[in-house]
Amino acid sequence: MKKLTGVSANDGIAIATVYKLVDSDLSFKKRTIKNPEKEIDRFEDALRSSGKELISIKKRVLSLLGDKAAQVFQAHIVMMRDPEFVNPIINQIKNNHINAEYALKKVSDRSVRYFDMMVNNHYMQERKNDIVDISKRIMSHLLGKKLPDLSLINKPVVVVTHDLTPSDTAQLNTKYVKGIVADQGGRTSHSAIMARILAMPAIVNTQKITNLVSNNDQIIVDGDSGIVIVNPTHKQVSIYQKKLKLQNQKLNSLNNLKQRKTVTKDKKRVMLSANIGTHNDATTALKNGAEGIGLYRTEFLYMNSDRLPTEDEQFQSYKTVLQRMKNKPVIIRTLDIGGDKQLPYMQMPKEDNPFLGYRAIRFSLNKEDIFRTQLRALLRASNYGDLSIIFPMVSTLGEFRAAKSIYNEERQKMINQNQPVGKIKIGIMVEVPSAAILADQFAKEVDLMSIGTNDLIQYTMAADRGNNYVANLYQPYHPAVLRLIKHVIDACHHEHKPARMCGEMASDPIAMPILLGMGLDEFSMSSSSILKIRSLMKKLDTNKMAKLATKVVHSANTSEDVIEMVKSMVSFQY
Amino acid sequence: MVKRQFKIISEAGIHARPATLLVQTATKYNSKVTLEYQGKSVDLKSIMGVMSLGVGHNAKIVINANGDDEKDALNAVSETMEKEGLSK
């Protein structure tokens, strides 16, 4: 038995046998060749078969892991055909009469050295790994050797490796590969990110796992605590089998809830939606049983770019979300920039109080051209699903009216040009106390309101949660915050409109029962929380929770009181 | 031979993504397409060549195209430059 610790890259338990991933022997001898033309043909054959292989890997990755992961292989395909890479190899063969393997090695080593020199260019440094990966692939074809093919694994294993390359990960069959253990890497390294996407337990940075195991050794991966056990004792195996069984039961009971609607113990329907940051997250949201998108934060479109995104780019992204959600409601928030969120390509004024300053709708109303571009993209996308638009950080009715009239102008322009536009609901985020206090007036004018708790709490308590000196004042359960929220929910209901929330509070186990009792209709949260909250709601009775909410709003003095009251009425067993 | 001058307006210069797209565009044509910057000239069909120049914000570059489809090639490259926000 050997036990070692590493960095947990993803939690969960796996018990299986070891599959040690070792590099193929790609050694060769330098040869002089008589017929360079024939040797060049051999090299080009290897290029072609490598290219075909890459295209099939790219397809597999695209369907398995999505666009971003597949881009790595698109880059490989382009680089493999780069004349600055291919021509020197061909010239080496032609002029020096050397074998293709040697020519490939010589040119690839030279490129690696060249990338090594570019210490200030992070992007080019990364390309070095691509060249190494590509060269390995071409070399294996020249030598007629197969690179280890992980897709051939046909029994449950834990893959043990020095470090996982993108090509390796693309071939992992999640049906059989139960976990990953690596010598190298950290929580943010490529293999760690892939492990999380594939949802398998992984431990990285063990330093020496490859030296300690051989194929078919039994191995336990405990991603919850970052421990690896090689050839465990009977006792250890039985302890971990129990843990594994429990983990699977929990997973199964949650998975069973995926296609179900959210209902409380007394059969009241509640809607659970997802907060997303990119259009690809819509797929994750659906996988986790989201009934809609409660908040699409569009600022990432602007932040993950080196310039303002064009109308077309935005349209494509919004359209993708609406199409993937197939007529489930989608709420898109217009640009919320400023405060802690900056655009790298846009000079923003320096402010003494950025959180009380120039941000969100205040910015959009001042930069009308940017705002209009976004609205046009949204109007065009509205033809593809059930779209609502909300404006962030609205403090006054005047701001809402101004924003809506710009929207109406753009809408009218499109109608005049005979462009089709769908039905769109227009509303606000309630995250500034002034808007919460006048919620009854807002509710009459807007189509929808969504409570953004992170900002509402910070502005109500006048405390920045990122500031250690005052973070203790940032209290989500404070009765002042809860009263304000109740007021907003009541205002929505008074106008027969659903009350929505899209802050972290919506998935907080203490706040959620209170919100349910207040009659909140839509809870929007990160995708990973949806199934847990759905299973918890099944156990809550809305009438009982309404009593709890009344009690909290009327008689709690402090956050501690609130927590006590909730705990005395709800048991938190997921 | 045809050529056109561009001023790079994008803050990040010719970065990873636009560079790949420029190369993909140039590769579609038979003509030889080159990028000239600060006295150096590289093949616009080579991603490594383009990246090695480190073309930054406000840089002035010249694209040359030479061959039977040179006009189409230059137009397509210009279009990609505009679409990617590299130049106006």
Image (cartoon, coloured by chain):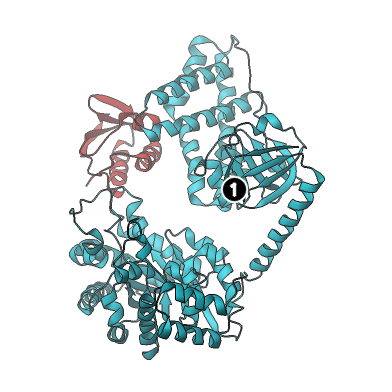
Chain colours: A cyan, B red
Q: Is residue A210 left or right of residue A418?
A: right
Residue A137: percent from left, percent from top: 58, 30
Viewport quadrant of the C terminus of chain A: bottom right
Question: Taking the image as drawn, is residue A423 in sight?
Answer: no
Compared across the picture, whether A445 is left or right of A109 comes to left
Q: Could you tell me which quadrant the N terminus of chain A lies in?
A: top right
- Decide if residue B35 is in sight here: yes
Q: Position of residue A375 (x, y in %)?
A: 29, 68
Q: Residue shown at 56%/16% (left/top)?
A: A102
Residue ID for mark 1: A60
Give the side of residue A248 with respect to residue A53, left or right. Answer: right
In this image, A347 relative to A207: left or right?
A: left
Closer to us: A147 or A52 = A147
Please state which amino acid type lies under the numbered disc 1: Arg
Q: Which residue is at the front of the view, A419 or A313? A: A313
Which corner quadrant of the image does residue A151 belong to? top right
| Disc 1 secondary structure class | helix
Question: Where residue A381 sits: x, y (%)?
Answer: 38, 68
Please determine whether, in this image, residue A55 is positioned above or below residue A374.
above
Q: In this rendering, is residue A477 above or below A64?
A: below
